[in-house]
């Protein structure tokens, strides 16, 4: 703001002033969703529980005292091993240690499939608007009207022997419409913002507008949703196991263990309780994580 | 007022009814950082004091402190607010509740959010009277009617049974004024009550307010960022900067003989209706609490700063009767000359080389016909301003020209090519040569991308440059818009509003356009930032020969930047022509009305 700064200046850069003000302090960088979530106690606790359980599922089979189908003593024996034996005389602790792999894998991949599918539907519906929105979301409502487990059961009963892939796709497809609804809601608030319109005015490809402009601004609520969906997936896969639908009926599976041993609940409760508790801990861990992210997302980070 | 004495009540010249603020400071909770400090202010009865400052100056904080209120995260650290000798800051909360509304009333910036949307207007006012124990059950409804009549609103049953959303912005604001005045307060705090209103509505609200203050002998603190409004209604003006009062004095003194460099810089950055001014901004940005420089808080942006300015915080000192300045060099820096920034108006008879012409433009929103038969053209290196009140269709026109709204008929010809309706249907050359800059820089930049990515994108898209070469050009462009290369890796969320708008301009320039469409691009920014943005655009126009379609509601700004103007009303052009002609000799009643209602400084 010196007197010599008049309109005569042809050089635009001169507007910054000859006196060159000291660089103003810049606000500290906005930390990412993950960093902000790490400051949340419930998120760190949830993350800790989840990571511990994942490590347990991966490494426990190598440390198990007995093999997956090894007979350790008479059936429903409380005395043998830490948690006793199950209906076939297999060691419950070893079964629990072996039985997480399938649940974890199907739950994780199923959630991933459901998220990708759901986000794709939701964002395209929000960005496309008009007919796209109507058609996609009404089809979505059709799938949404089936309870998750029923949808899976309808397909599974028609198949002789479900493979792990079928289970993953089923879990994913049953999640997708729920994710799509949320994704559409979040995306609707973003596609009308000026920076998306600015990209449109430049003539960016639609796919690029979605990938580069819209999606990066949705990550906090979507992460929270992913955590929540993972919780549901664990429950769903466990329930399917309980109902007898698992990729390998002979292999150990937490959900299936509950069903196999429920007749001996009175005599050997551990054979049921052990898998129940571990599924519960897993679900609580992922749920805490989702909660933590949701709180960060809610506070708004723009 | 001159010093913080210990016997404030007996101070001479403070008659009954006024308000005295002494040594007020507001601190951030948990930190030893002040938001505002050392505020001394006197409101005499019937007097309107304008408290002016840019965003971040602490003006609203001072305003609410008069009601013993501070926002979450801050607390009133010291000071006294004396109402007839009683200190509001040391009252018990029950007393404060009683004083608020009854003796000191507050009118918020957005009255629509202060009125309950589910309760009818009449009932709301009656409830207020009930709460304050005014009148009897029978007389209260009549009281509500009287209150509404006083602010010039209808007071029949139909109006009383309306909900807040059924009123216009100006009406809501006047209801809020009526409610503030009904308990007959002694002091009124108004926090930017006319921001977001049209000039005609604003003029009406201001008139109402001024009249009520005069008839009831109410003293008012009018908090605003708009110097022009203050020039119209205030008796005295306090200019705030970075949490302190920089200058305080009678209106005439502040506007004729400003003594603080900041006040002068502010006045240099505002446009006038009566003359074209070359606007200048203030370099740098307003420091946030905790980041303020030592010594005089303005020293890092001040053109007159000397070493002594960095050492001690200057005291407010008297330069003329009733006129105080917080600057140690106040006497030494010469007098301020309003006409220094005056430039000749754009020559109306200049030869024009048409680049963009709009013919018979009709625009629709669904079945609604919002713009009727608008035709005008834009020449090379020329700025045409589209002016009108909200709802006049000015932004709609600019969006249609920019290809962001496609429901229109008519012909838009751009350098020989007839433009398609939407940006997507236009070919890359036309998209590149016609760039749009949005009103709100907080919304128009993707918060997840870095400045480099944002500015580089148009170059990659239009094949102008890529890779290292593009990065070099980004640095060059940032330099042109007065931003340093260190911004490259920052995300937009870390920049201030003015810096963001510069980035948005740099992005538009990256495409090497021939025409810029500027949609109210300074309305979300502080005046000092507006000044520098206008100076920047003017430089670009001269240097690169860029033409601009400049949408604004601010007529004074048009005088500074435009060469031609189109006055719009309800989707039709009511008057058009060279800026000088239209503003000096308006032919239409509507234009004359707009001009007379616009707040003016001169």
Image (cartoon, coloured by chain):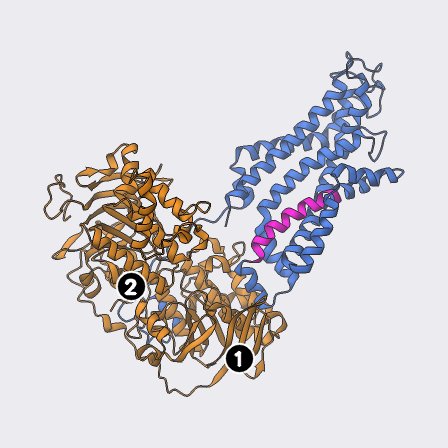
Chain colours: A blue, B orange
Chain bearing tag 1 is B
Q: Is residue B498 left or right of residue B88?
A: right
Question: Separation of disc 2 and disc 1 at Cα?
Answer: 36 Å
Number of residues whose C-alpha sits closer than 10 Å to that of mark 1, classed few (under 14), some (14–19) or many (20 or more): some
B202 and A70: which is toward the camera: B202
Hey, which residue is sitting farthest front in the picture? B138
Task: Kindly report which numbered mark, 2 or 1, lies closer to the viewer in this rendering.
Answer: 1
Number of residues whose C-alpha sits closer than 10 Å to that of mark 2, classed few (under 14), some (14–19) or many (20 or more): many
Q: At which x and y percent is residue B443?
A: 49, 58
Q: Is residue B265 left or right of residue A44?
A: left
Query: Circle 1 — which element?
Result: strand
A211 above or below B373? Answer: above
Queried whether the magenta region covers residue A188, the answer comes back as: yes
Query: Can residue B52 be seen by looking at this rendering?
Result: yes
Queried whether the magenta region covers residue B384, the answer comes back as: no
B487 and A216: which is toward the camera: A216
Dot label at residue B360 = 1
B89 and A51: which is toward the camera: B89
The residue pinned by badge 2 equals B228
Q: At which x and y percent is residue A244?
A: 83, 30
Mark 2 or mark 1, which has the lower sequence index? 2
Residue numbers of the magenta segment? A173-192
Quarter in which the C terminus of chain B is drawn: bottom left
Hey, which residue is sitting farthest right in the picture? A160
Query: Can residue B48 be seen by looking at this rendering?
Result: no
Q: At which x and y percent is residue B115?
A: 40, 47
Q: Residue at x 32, y 72 (%)?
A: B278
A74 above or below B358? Answer: above
Q: Residue at x 30, y 77 (%)?
A: B343
């Amino acid at each position: 703001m010196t007197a010599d700064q008049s309109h005569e200046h042809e050089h635009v850069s001169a507007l910054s002033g000859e006196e060159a003000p000291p660089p103003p302090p810049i606000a500290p960088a906005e930390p990412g969703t993950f960093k902000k979530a790490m400051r949340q106690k419930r998120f760190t606790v949830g993350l800790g529980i989840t990571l511990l359980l994942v490590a347990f599922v991966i490494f426990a089979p190598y440390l198990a005292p007995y093999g997956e189908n090894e007979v350790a003593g008479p059936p429903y024996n409380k005395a043998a091993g830490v948690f006793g034996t199950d209906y076939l005389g297999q060691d419950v602790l070893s079964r629990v240690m072996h039985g997480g792999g399938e649940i974890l894998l199907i739950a994780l991949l199923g959630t991933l499939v459901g998220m990708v599918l759901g986000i794709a539907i939701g964002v395209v519906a929000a960005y496309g608007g008009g007919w796209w929105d109507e058609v996609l979301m009404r089809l979505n409502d059709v799938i949404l009207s089936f309870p998750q487990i029923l949808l899976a059961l309808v397909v599974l009963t028609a198949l002789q022997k479900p493979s792990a892939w079928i289970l993953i796709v089923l879990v994913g497809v049953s999640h997708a419409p729920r994710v799509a609804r949320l994704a559409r809601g979040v995306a609707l608030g973003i596609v009308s913002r000026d920076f998306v319109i600015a990209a449109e005015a430049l003539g960016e490809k639609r796919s690029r507008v979605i990938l580069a402009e819209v999606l990066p601004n949705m990550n906090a609520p979507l992460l929270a949703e992913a955590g929540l969906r993972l919780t549901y997936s664990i429950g769903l896969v466990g329930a399917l196991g309980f109902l007898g639908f698992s990729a390998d009926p002979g292999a150990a599976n937490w959900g299936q263990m509950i069903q196999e041993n429920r007749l001996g609940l009175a005599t050997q409760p551990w054979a049921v309780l052990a898998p129940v508790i571990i599924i519960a801990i897993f679900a609580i861990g992922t749920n805490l994580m989702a909660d933590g992210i949701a709180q960060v997302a809610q506070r708004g980070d723009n | 007022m001159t010093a913080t004495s210990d016997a404030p009540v007996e101070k001479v010249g403070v008659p009954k009814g006024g308000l005295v603020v002494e040594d007020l400071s507001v601190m951030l909770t948990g930190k030893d950082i002040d938001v505002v400090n050392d505020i001394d202010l006197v409101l005499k009865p019937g007097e309107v004091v304008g408290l002016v400052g840019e965003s971040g100056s602490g003006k609203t904080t001072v305003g609410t402190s008069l009601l013993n209120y501070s926002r979450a995260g801050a607390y009133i650290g010291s000071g006294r607010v004396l109402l007839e000798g009683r200190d509001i800051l040391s009252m018990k909360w029950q007393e404060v509740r009683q004083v608020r509304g009854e003796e000191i009333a507050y009118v918020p910036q957005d009255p629509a959010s202060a009125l309950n949307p589910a309760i009818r207007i009449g009932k709301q006012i009656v409830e207020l009277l009930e709460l304050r124990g005014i009148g009897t059950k029978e007389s209260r409804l009549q009281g509500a009617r009287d209150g509404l009549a006083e602010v010039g609103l209808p007071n029949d049953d139909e109006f009383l049974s309306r909900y807040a959303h059924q009123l216009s912005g100006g009406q809501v604001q006047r209801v809020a004024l009526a409610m503030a005045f009904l308990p007959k307060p002694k002091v009124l705090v108004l926090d930017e009550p006319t921001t977001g209103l049209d000039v005609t509505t604003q003029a009406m609200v201001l008139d109402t307010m001024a009249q009520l203050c005069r008839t009831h002998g109410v003293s008012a603190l009018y908090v605003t960022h708009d110097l022009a409004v203050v020039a119209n209604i205030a008796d005295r003006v306090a200019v705030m900067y970075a949490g302190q009062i920089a200058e305080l004095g009678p209106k005439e003194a502040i506007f004729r003989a400003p003594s603080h460099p900041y006040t002068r810089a502010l006045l240099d950055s505002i446009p006038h209706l009566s003359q074209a001014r070359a606007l200048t901004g203030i370099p740098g940005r307003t420091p946030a609490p905790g980041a303020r420089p030592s010594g005089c808080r303005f020293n890092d942006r001040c053109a007159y700063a000397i070493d002594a300015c960095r050492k001690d915080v200057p005291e407010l000192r008297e330069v003329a009767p009733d006129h105080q300045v917080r600057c140690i060099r106040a006497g030494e820096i010469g007098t301020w000359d309003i006409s220094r920034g005056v430039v000749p108006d754009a020559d109306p008879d200049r030869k024009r080389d048409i680049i963009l012409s709009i013919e018979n433009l009709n625009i629709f929103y669904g079945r609604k016909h919002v713009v009727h038969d608008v035709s005008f053209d834009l020449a090379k290196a020329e700025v045409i301003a589209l002016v009108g009140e909200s709802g006049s269709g000015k932004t709609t026109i600019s969006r249609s020209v920019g290809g962001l709204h496609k429901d229109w008929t008519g012909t838009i010809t751009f350098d020989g090519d007839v433009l398609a309706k939407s940006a997507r249907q236009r070919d890359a050359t036309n998209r590149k040569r016609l760039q749009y800059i949005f009103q709100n820089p907080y919304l128009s930049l993707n918060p997840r991308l870095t400045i480099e990515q944002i500015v580089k994108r148009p170059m990659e898209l239009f094949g102008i440059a890529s890779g290292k070469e593009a990065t070099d050009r980004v640095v060059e462009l940032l330099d042109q818009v007065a931003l340093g290369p260190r911004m490259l890796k920052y995300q937009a969320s870390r920049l201030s509003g003015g810096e963001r708008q510069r980035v948005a301009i740099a992005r538009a320039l990256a495409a090497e356009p021939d025409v810029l469409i500027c949609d109210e691009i300074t309305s979300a920014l502080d005046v000092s930032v507006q000044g520098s943005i206008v100076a920047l655009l003017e430089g670009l126009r001269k240097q690169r020969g860029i033409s601009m379609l400049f949408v604004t509601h601010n007529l004074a700004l048009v005088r500074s930047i435009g060469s031609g103007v189109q006055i719009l009303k309800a989707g039709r052009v009511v008057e058009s022509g060279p800026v000088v002609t239209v503003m000096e000799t308006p032919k239409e009643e509507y234009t004359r009305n707009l001009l007379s209602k616009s707040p003016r400084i001169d």
